Image (spheres, rainbow, N blue to C red):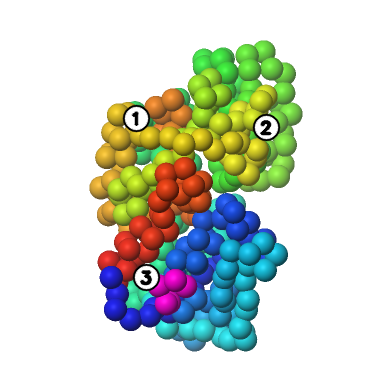
Amino acid sequence: MVAQALKVAFQMDPMETVNIDGDSTFVLMLEAQARGHEVWHYLAEDLSYAEGAVYAEARPVSVRREKGNHFSFGKAKVINIRDMDVVWMRQDPPFDMAYITATHLLDMVSDETLVVNNPAEVRNAPEKLFVMQYQDLMPATMITRSEDEVRRFRDKHGDIVIKPLYGNGGAGVFHIKPGDSNIGSLMEMFLEVSREPVMAQKFLSEVVRGDKRIILVDGEAVGAINRVPAEGEVRSNLVAGGTAEKSVLTEREVEICERLKPELKARGLLFVGIDVIDGYLTEINVTSPTGLQSINKYDGVSLEATIWDAVERKL
């Protein structure tokens, strides 16, 4: 544990939008404050570079678990990011060029300031691409912009799911069944709104029993929650109406975590959330993982304290 107070900046979304009952960044801020650290807040769009310095217009912030009154700001000040001991990169995806640019800017200071997660590896390990390194742990998967390829994939696997390659929170996820006539319209929509490919995966029918979110801290599995889709839904994300249930790791899930551990540690991906459905790894979330408060509630733990312990060990 560090002996002195740290200067900590959270690069995140507006404080006004924070759901204090579910937001993982909020409890990380509460824990930083409880440890006596100096906490600052700024938006990703406030990050700038000039004459060799990366800086942001930030505000000191105090937080409290009071609905409608969960934060107070101090006077705004331009801070040099190198003056911070820790920067948390916690703005929500989508993982677009703005997100990538932010990783480049923070990478310029990562030799002196601990950025969580490592910005270069966040850039190199987007959720739905990093996972492709573990094909033997995954369901059948395709990445393409070709409608014909998606049709061939559906013909081979029957039920499939199509989703944006860089989406988040379950947005834009579609379940396509054999004989479904909507593939053409869906692909037309995807290709019109984005130059990026889509991801198609074999549909895992066991998703109705839940999509497990497992939190790993410095490569170690520290907790899990099962997220069950609402009736008639295939999306289990809590922001999409899924319901959280208490869960423990199966033998298969322990195996998956052990496979990932060396790579996560080597890349400096300190706080990671993986998604597992019916023993299949579907995503490795490194941009802004969530799930801390749900796991805390069901397991009677404080994962934000576990994460902060790991951060302080790094320092």
Q: Which amino acid type corresponds to the residue marked 3 in the rendered image? A: Leu
Stretch of the chain drawn in magenta: 33-37
Measured as percent of width and height from the top left, residue 299 is found at: 42, 44
Q: How many neighbours does mark 3 have within 10 angstroms: few (below 14), some (14-19), or many (20 or more)?
A: many
Residue 114 numbered tag: 3
Q: Which amino acid type corresponds to the residue marked 1 in the rendered image? A: Thr
Determine whether, in the image, residue 88 is placed left or right of residue 255: right
Judge whether 183 appears above or below 27 on screen.
above
Mark 3 residue element: strand
Residue 187 numbered tag: 2
Determine whether, in the image, residue 161 is placed left or right of residue 276: right
Q: How many neighbours does mark 1 have within 10 angstroms: few (below 14), some (14-19), or many (20 or more)?
A: few
Report if residue 156 is visible in the image: yes
Mark 2–mark 3 Cα distance, whole angstroms, equals 41 Å
Q: In which quarter of the image is residue 85?
A: bottom left
Mark 2 residue element: helix
From the image, state whether disc 2 or disc 1 is nearer to you: 1
Q: Which of marks 2 and 3 is nearer the N terminus?
A: 3
Magenta-colored stretch includes residue 172: no
Residue 250 numbered tag: 1
Q: Which of marks 1 and 3 is nearer the N terminus?
A: 3
Q: Earlier in the sequence, mark 2 or mark 1?
A: 2
Q: In which quarter of the image is residue 14?
A: bottom right
Mark 1–mark 3 Cα distance, whole angstroms, equals 33 Å
Measured as percent of width and height from the top left, residue 17 is found at: 67, 61
Determine whether, in the image, residue 175 is placed left or right of residue 300: right
Q: Which amino acid type corresponds to the residue marked 2 in the rendered image? A: Met
